Structure formats: structure tokens, C-alpha cells
Amino acid sequence: MLDIQKEFLRRGVLRGGVFVLLPDDAIELVRRCKEVGIEILGADAFRITDKNTQPDMANDLRTPVPRETCWSLATAHLEKYIGSGFFFEVVCHEPHRKIDPTLRR
């Protein structure tokens, strides 16, 4: 988990080592990333129930995106899923930062 994602721990769910947020909160994470210059590489969709965490690649945002537009494209994609019940892992690129190994599973 990246440092920027730790700011959103109380809003999200950590399942199987994957930190996911509802679209509204994922949009806030994207906005926060933009504020500090962290690039968004994509957003992976998940359906989550009490017993299962199911990736849903058909609803992912995973395209090569120019840095200048990554935040607006991620926000527009996530806005389409508000109220849908999907959760998203926002894939961030935080250069020169190490992933916190204590939060991996």
C-alpha cells in the first residue's frame, strides 16, 4: 500500500492484500493524487460480498493514459459507477516510494 492510500484506510476495504474503495471515495483518492502529483495508472473493478472478492475486468480502467489526462480520465470512469455497488482499486504510481510491506497479505 502506498502512503497516499493510507489516508483513505478508514473509507476502504482491504481484501486479499487489495485495497478497494467505493467510487465516491476512489474519486477523492484520485483528486488527492492529483494534488501531490501522483500519476493514476488505472482502476481495477471488484464485486465484494461477505464471502467473496471477485475481480471484474470488464469494468476496469486499464489503458495507457498520458500523465496530463490520467486524473480526469480516472475520475470520469469512476463517476460512471457511483451507486453501482462496485469497488475499485486505484492503481497509483508513486515514484521513489516503497510499498509498506506490513500491509501486504
Image (spheres, grey):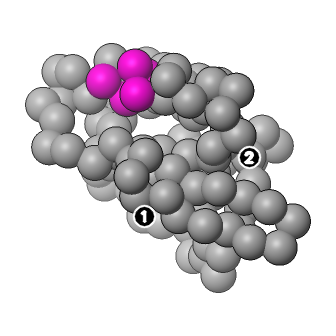
Circle 1: residue type = Lys
Q: Which residues are magenta?
A: 73-77
At horizontal 43% and vertical 22% (from top left) the residue drawn is 75
Question: What main secondary structure does the magenta stretch of the protein show?
Answer: helix
Residue 98 in view (yes/no): yes
* Discs 1/2, front: 2
Q: Position of residue 36 (x, y in %)?
A: 41, 26
**Quadrant (top left, top right, bottom left, bottom right) of the N terminus:** bottom right
Numbered label attached to residue 98: 1
Residue 74 placement: quadrant: top left
- Is residue 1 visible to the viewer in this orientation of the structure? no
Amino acid on which disc 2 is placed: Gly
Rendered location of residue 87, percent (x, y): 63, 46
Residue drawn at (12%, 31%), measured in percent from left and top? 66
Q: Image height check: is 84 above or below 13?
A: above
For label 1, the SS is loop
* 58 left or right, relative to 67: right
Where is residue 42, by image quadrant? top left
Q: Position of residue 89 (x, y in %)?
A: 53, 51
Q: Which mark is residue 12?
A: 2
Magenta span includes 33: no
Circle 1 residues within 10 Å: few <14, some 14–19, many ≥20 = few
Query: Residue 39 at x, y = what percent?
Result: 30, 36
For the residues marked 1 and 2, what is the alpha-carbon distance in whole angstroms? 21 Å
Sequence-wise, the earlier of marks 1 and 2 is 2
